[in-house]
Amino acid sequence: MTEALDALLDLLDLEQIERDYFRGRSRSALVPRVFGGQVAAQALVAAGRTVPGDRAPHSLHAYFLRAGDPGAPIVYMVDRIRDGRSFTTRRVVAVQHGNPIFHLSASFQTYEEGLEHQTDMPSAPDPESLPTAAEMLPRHLPADVAERLIEARAAVDLRYADAPPWASVGTAREPRSQVWFRTNGKLADDPLLHIALATYVSDMTLLDSVLLAHGRGGWAVGDVVGASLDHAMWFHRPFRADEWLLYDQESPSASAGRGLGQARIYTQDGRLAVTVIQEGVVRVPR
């Protein structure tokens, strides 16, 4: 296990300070706010700590309310909305400095057999044939920016199927991108942990497809100011975050200073594991 992955797992191992209250720390931020994927993953872990072990998350819906302070702890307050025979519902509010910064609702379900179908996995290059993000970044970004990005993402092996926004500035193309990802090390056999790590990664690249449509490079090159507004995920089938997952992303719309991204996450053998939708602020600096 890499040191970076070990540090990320430590962030997700929340401190329980009361029956339904948990405290999380933050890692150094690339920008002066907490990474949204971290808050979403920690909130999901907090909710999961109050749910019977035979129930796994099947969906989450979240809003980013305020920028998080990376220098202060985050308190996650869990509300036990409902415990049914098959489904459990939890609501989580993340608080810093006395103010809510994030709100999440999550639903958990016991496994059961049912109807089965899925959208076919799109074609994608073999992940092992692609360069790592750590290999690509220094070729396209200033050394200090590339170094910070590599450090921030060191726990995850990201591999772009095509040139990411920061490597194709000025060239508008179809608003679609594909990224393979897996953790840089093996994980324990805890379904909640694998789902939390996929939640963490899901906030890294989803709005890239918005930028591609306009030839923008994003915050890394300073031609766009952005932030996540809301985030929704549906977990369809079991998966492991330490095995290759294809993040197939596209943007159907951008308007009014906002951009919408939607995506599907597939296992390497073609099973549809997760559906993701996110809207974010996407503003051109004036």
Image: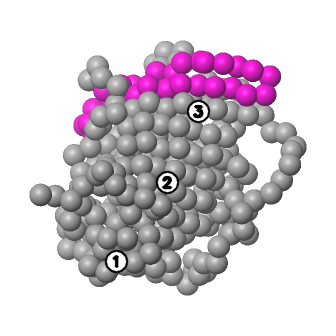
Label 3 sits on a secondary structure element that is strand
At which x and y percent is residue 156? 48, 61
The residues colored magenta run 69-96
Q: Name the residue under label 2.
A: 202
Per the picture, the main secondary structure of the magenta-coloured stretch is strand
Side of 183 relative to 216 (left or right): right
Side of 241 relative to 54 (left or right): left
Q: Name the residue under label 3.
A: 106
| Residue positioned 62% across, 40% down in the render | 59
Spatial CA distance of label 3 from label 2 is 16 Å
Figure check: 128 above or below 91: below
Q: Which residue lies furthest to the bottom in this view?
A: 129
Please, what is the three-letter code of the amino acid marked with disc 1? Ala
Label 2 sits on a secondary structure element that is helix
At which x and y percent is residue 122? 65, 73
Asked if residue 88 is among those painted magenta in the image, a careful observer would answer yes
Label 1 sits on a secondary structure element that is loop
The numbered disc on residue 172 is 1
The local crowd at label 3, few if under 14, some if 14 to 19, many if 20 or more residues have their Cα within 10 Å, is: many
